[in-house]
Structures are given as C-alpha cells and as structure tokens.
Image (spheres, rainbow, N blue to C red):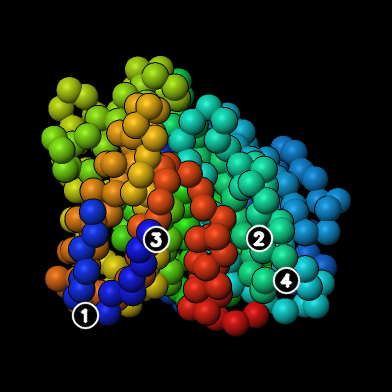
Amino acid sequence: MSQSHVSRRRVLKTAGGMAAALAAGGAGALASASAAHAAGDGFGLRIVDRNENDPRMKYFRFATDAIGWDPGVNVLLPDDYSSGRRYPVLYLLHGGGLDQDFITFDRWGIRALTAGKPIIVVMPDGGHTGWYSNPVSSNTGPRNWETFHIAQLLPWIDANFRTFAEYDGRAVAGFSMGGFGALKYTAKYYGHFASVSSHSGPASLRRDQGLVVHWANVTSAAVDLAGGTVYGAPLWDEARVTADNPVQRVPSYHNKRIFLVAGTSPDPVNWAEWVTEREVLAGQREFRARLGEAGIPHEWHEEPGGHVFRTEMFRRDLDGVIGRLRKA
C-alpha cells in the first residue's frame, strides 16, 4: 500500500549525487529578459554551443572557470511563453550515474509532464557523481558544481528569461543525488528557493557511520575526480558535511514547501538499489521526524518499489510547486 501524509505541527505517523553566491530575495536584484532578448554571456558563463530552434526546449552549453569541461543546460519553457508574461522557475536536478546528465529528464518525458503548466524548468548538468558540491579535492581540474549552479546559472537564467527573480519565484527539485542537491541548496541558500522536493534523495549524511558521505566520496573519486573526493578522505571536512547535511539544517526549512518521496520495497536481488533506497528511506524518515519536532509542515510519500523516478509523484509535486510559487 502507498503511504502519504502532510505533516503540519508534528510527525503524526511513522512508517517503515558560497562567497560568490547571490544575495537572497529582492525582486529587483536581477534584471530579467524582455520578450525579444537573445540569451547571451554573463555571470562567468560563456555560451559555446546552443540550439533554440524548438519552441519550448532551449539548449545551451557553457565554458566556465567553475568546471573543467563545458556543462550543458536544458531550459524548458511553458507552451505560452510567447505571451510575454513572467513565470516561476523550477530547477530540476538529475541523479548520479554514467547515464545521468542534463538530458535525463527529457528522456523521461519532461515535455509531456509539463505540457500546459505555467512554469519554466531548468535542467543543468551536475556531473555523473558531482553531488552538487564544490569538492574538497580534485585531480581532474575544477568541478565546482555548487558555484556553477548557484553563483552563475541562477542569475544567468533570471537575466535571460522572463522570471520572477525572487524567493517566491523559484523552486528546486531532484531525483536521487539530485534530491540531495535540492535539499542541500535550499538550506544553504535560504532566500533562493520557496519550495524543495526530493524524489528518492538522501536526507541524512551522518547516519549509519556516515554511509552517504562515504558513498559520495567513493563514487566521486572513481568517476569524476580521479581520486579526489567531495568531503575529504580519510578525514572529512566536518564543517562542510554539517553545512550540507539536511538533518542538521532543519531551521533553514521554515516557511518553505517541502515534498519528500522514498520507495519501501527495493529489489533485494539488485544489491545497489536495495542498499541505496533503504538508506534513502531511513534518512528521509529521520529528516521527517526532525521537521515534525520543529513544527515545520511537509508532505511525504512512501511508495512501493525501489530507487526509481515516479512520474505520478512528480505530477503531484509539480502541481504543488506551481501552487506555492508566484503565478505567471
């Protein structure tokens, strides 16, 4: 059976992968694009490839000092973007793995899922195992995904598209590693996002002897950083772990819409999925309990199955995002 709940004052029911950042808030803090404005360079980003032929999906690739290669971004516009209205923005972060990148959600049907919805969806590269972080060490050049997303891409979007450049104009969501990234960015940059959604994303870094921290270190070292690590090894950068850990940042989730999804029955034959989703579920339960103790409302769902992106949950989530943000 599927379990779902919206927690308001307490948890009523328990069930068993920056100095330069923008100043928060301020509707007038950033210039927004006019209807005829062509996207250009800025905020440390130089466009090296682009395709804007599709009426809704706009593709850009950037050169940036924050990343040692040229990351891509898909920007999905609403059907009626030509109306000249301004729109809220959802930043949608992909998961970890060699098959995960800025195109992931397009492969999973994001155009159909958002058809007719009055919202811009921004889907950036985050590295195969970038963990939405500036790593402690890298042996392959800069891989500063946090800087790229928060200090560069976010103001670039507000400058080049008709957005609401303010707290109530932005949401962030993600799957798996991206779900962690969404929770992390929301807490660390409180004034940037009014809604956060984690679809099978870990929410507790230190539980089970720091399993998620070790997981982030091992995967990033093997895939993206040539032996470097996100959090440091053998000794962690403890301050960084604390700053990134959702369960240790609970006060930073006040006055936000929060949406959490985890699977309850991962495939026991698939060892990686079984371990991953069991840890996700346990971490989300811990996070939910702390939110409840702090009196922070949140919506949560425990769904049958394992570590997968559930389109029906995303549809529900998207309606909640649009309901929370400023209207187009």
First of labels 4, 3 by sequence position: 3
Q: Which mark is residue 113?
A: 2
Sequence-wise first label, 2 or 3: 3
The residue carrying pointer 3 sits among few (fewer than 14), some (14 to 19) or many (20 or more) residues within 10 Å by Cα, namely few
CA distance separating discs 4 and 2: 9 Å
Compare marks 3 and 1 and give the one earlier in the sequence.
Answer: 3
Q: Residue at x 59, y 72 (%)?
A: 88
Q: Which residue carries the number 4 mark?
A: 116
Percent of width and height locating residue 67? 51, 34
Q: Are marks 3 and 1 in contact (CB under 8 Å)?
A: no
Question: Which secondary structure lies at badge 3?
Answer: loop
Closer to the chain start, of discs 4 and 1, is 1
Please tell me in which quadrant of the rendered image residue 213 appears: top left
Q: In this orientation, does residue 279 appear?
A: yes
How far apart marks 4 and 1 lie (CA) works out to: 34 Å
Query: Badge 1 local density, few (<14 within 10 Å), some, or many (20+)?
Result: some
Measure the alpha-carbon separation of dots 4 and 3: 28 Å
Q: Which-is-in-front pick, marks 3 and 1?
A: 3
Callout 1 amino acid: Arg
In this rendered view, identify the residue nearer to me: 253 or 104: 104
Left or right relative to 84: residue 190 = left
Circle on res. 2: 3
Residue at 26% over, 66% down: 252
Closer to us: mark 4 or mark 3? Answer: 3
Label 2 – label 3 distance at C-alpha: 22 Å
Q: Nearer the viewer, mark 2 or mark 3?
A: 3
Dot 1: what SS?
Answer: loop
120 horizontally vs 134: left or right: right
Q: Which mark is residue 9?
A: 1
Q: Count of labels shown?
A: 4
Residue 278, by quadrant, is top left
Q: Quadrant of the C terminus?
A: bottom right
